[in-house]
Image (cartoon, helix red, strand yellow):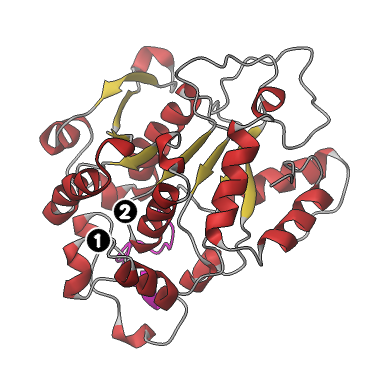
């Protein structure tokens, strides 16, 4: 497991070449060892390492791939004891999804440290001339509709994702001083995920997501320093849909009963339908029932558009030509 986190793009490329052939359970063990063993203090120089610090977390909506990761964290020397799990409750999920929270918690009992985050209440007082104010968290669908609108998901899906997923997650990751979060994305899901690597670095957005206080000792020459962004780990990047479900069945992993009704990807009730038969055999089939009529394939947590904009800005500042 003695593979340090990269400090250059070449090191990241080389590490991804190596991780591409590694079993997911060993990828998880590597991440755990790197962030929670002897290297932890070196990675968090000048950063508070209190009881509320969680360098490595899993973020999941309890889809099939996320459940495989959760089960492997549990079975790999009980890594789940020190890797909390975050799921975002948009307040618009299926009733089966809410019931499944209890199923998962019961299956992994006290080993699972599950955090369910709620949407944020963001206000835009006229006196602040467009600036926003965080007013707390929203705890019910009725309250959400009163604060925003019953159709925000349709009239402004980007902002809907911001207040239900992106901002709640970023607040928790910042509170926990998280260095790396684990996702269940796979190449076989198609769309923006087709060229997915096992390890990615998400730079902080220029709109204030990064609230870390930098010190003079920060290694600002390192493009992957924790003051500049967070690592994102995709341990099942190279698994197929069949591999995921074969694992679930063989290991008797509990799953959302909606999958038995034909769903292949489950999100909000109003934007999730059965997969489209016209896409059978295509890479996008699995997620073809998501974000109905919204002209998008990602919820916003994993969109590559912001990453492209960041890279473009970096190249322009360096005086280099930008091509995609």
Q: Residue furthest right?
A: 319
Q: Position of residue 293 (x, y in %)?
A: 31, 66
Left or right: 177, with 88 as reference point: right
Q: Does the magenta stretch include residue 293?
A: yes
Q: Quadrant of the C terminus?
A: bottom right
- Name which of mark 2 and mark 1 comes first in the sequence: 2
- Image quadrant of residue 285? bottom left
Question: Which residue in the protein does label 2 denote?
Answer: 62
Question: Which residue in the protein does label 1 denote?
Answer: 255
Left or right: 188, with 306 as reference point: left
CA gap between label 2 and label 1 equals 8 Å
Left or right: 43, with 281 as reference point: right
Q: Where is residue 280 in the image (x, y as percent from the top left)?
A: 37, 86
Task: Please report the bounds of the magenta region as a residue range.
Answer: 285-299
- Identified at 26% across, 41% down, the residue is 89
- Main secondary structure type of the part rendered in magenta: loop
Q: What element carries label 1?
A: loop
Which is nearer the eye, 51 or 320?
Answer: 51
- Image quadrant of residue 141? top left
User: Residue 203, can we see it?
Assistant: no
- Identified at 63% across, 16% down, the residue is 47
Left or right: 291, with 202 as reference point: left
């Amino acid at each position: 497991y003695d593979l340090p986190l990269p400090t250059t793009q070449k090191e990241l490329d080389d590490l991804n070449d190596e991780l591409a052939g590694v079993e997911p359970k060993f990828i998880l063990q590597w991440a755990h060892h790197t962030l929670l063993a002897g290297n932890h203090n070196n990675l968090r120089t000048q950063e508070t390492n209190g009881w509320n610090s969680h360098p490595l977390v899993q973020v999941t909506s309890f889809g099939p791939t996320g459940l495989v990761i959760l089960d492997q964290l549990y079975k790999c020397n009980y890594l789940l004891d020190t890797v909390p799990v975050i799921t975002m409750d948009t307040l618009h999920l299926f009733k089966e999804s809410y019931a499944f929270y209890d199923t998962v918690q019961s299956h992994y009992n006290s080993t699972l440290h599950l955090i369910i985050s709620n949407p944020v209440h963001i206000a835009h007082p006229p006196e602040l001339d467009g600036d926003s104010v965080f007013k707390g968290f929203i705890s019910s669908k009725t309250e959400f509709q009163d604060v925003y609108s019953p159709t925000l998901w349709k009239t402004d899906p980007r902002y809907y994702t911001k207040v239900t997923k992106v901002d709640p997650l970023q607040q928790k990751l910042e509170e926990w001083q998280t260095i790396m979060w684990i996702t269940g994305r796979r190449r076989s899901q198609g769309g923006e995920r087709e060229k997915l690597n096992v390890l990615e670095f998400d730079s902080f957005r220029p709109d204030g997501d990064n609230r870390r206080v930098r010190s003079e000792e920060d290694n600002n020459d390192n493009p992957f320093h924790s003051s500049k962004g967070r690592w994102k780990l995709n341990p099942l990047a190279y698994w197929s849909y069949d591999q995921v479900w074969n694992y679930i069945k063989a290991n008797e992993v509990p799953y959302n009963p909606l999958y038995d009704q034909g769903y292949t990807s489950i999100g909000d009730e109003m934007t999730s339908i059965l997969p489209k038969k016209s896409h059978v055999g295509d890479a996008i089939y699995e997620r073809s029932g998501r974000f109905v009529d919204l002209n998008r394939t990602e919820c916003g947590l994993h969109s590559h558009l912001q990453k492209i904009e960041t890279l473009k800005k970096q190249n322009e500042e360096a005086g280099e030509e930008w091509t995609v």
